[in-house]
Amino acid sequence: DGGQNEAPIIQGEMVSDLLHHLDTHKSMGPDRIHPRVLRELAEVFTKTLSIIHQQSWLTGEVPVDWRLGNVMPINKKGWKKDLGNYRPVSLTSVPGKAIEQIILGAITQHVQD
């Protein structure tokens, strides 16, 4: 089948690169892990997150905390007392967003190949 069903190998370099480029001005999710912590301690977290990401890919499951989100109403424009002027924004786990980026990259690469 040409390797189409093979899981991509989540390499430490991929995870490390993502961690080193996290925007430290973004908010933390419900797991309360701030992007600055992951960025500053990237060398400490890279191997563990690589293993978790690889297992998530293979099993199709992600840690429960990575699936949670804090939904905040954000005013788009206009009168703040008009509820129609708000949009929901979900603050999700930073490690969860990292695996989303890795999966997106793997899918994009697969489609391009």
Image (tube, rainbow, N blue to C red):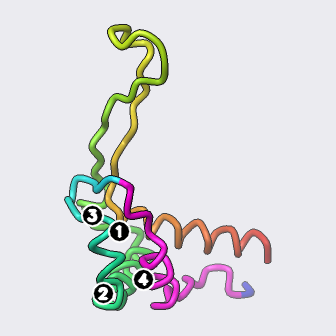
Q: Residue 74 location, x and y as percent?
A: 38, 29
Q: Which residue is mark 2?
A: 48
Judge left or right: residue 68 versus residue 74: left
Query: Would residue 30 be found to the left or right of residue 105 on screen?
Result: left
- Cβ–Cβ below 8 Å for labels 1 and 2? no
50 sits left or right of 5 in the view:
left
Q: CA distance from mark 3 to mark 2?
A: 17 Å
Question: What whole-number distance in Å separates the C-alpha atoms at marks 1 and 2?
Answer: 11 Å
Disc 3 element? loop
Disc 1: which residue: 95
Question: Does label 3 or label 2 sit earlier along the sequence?
Answer: 3
| Tag 2 secondary structure | helix
Residue closest to the far front: 25
Q: Earlier in the sequence, mark 4 or mark 3?
A: 3
> Number of callouts in the render?
4
Pointer 1 or 3: first along the chain: 3
Rendered view: 81 above or below 60: above
**Who's the residue at 42% across and 62% down the image?**
97
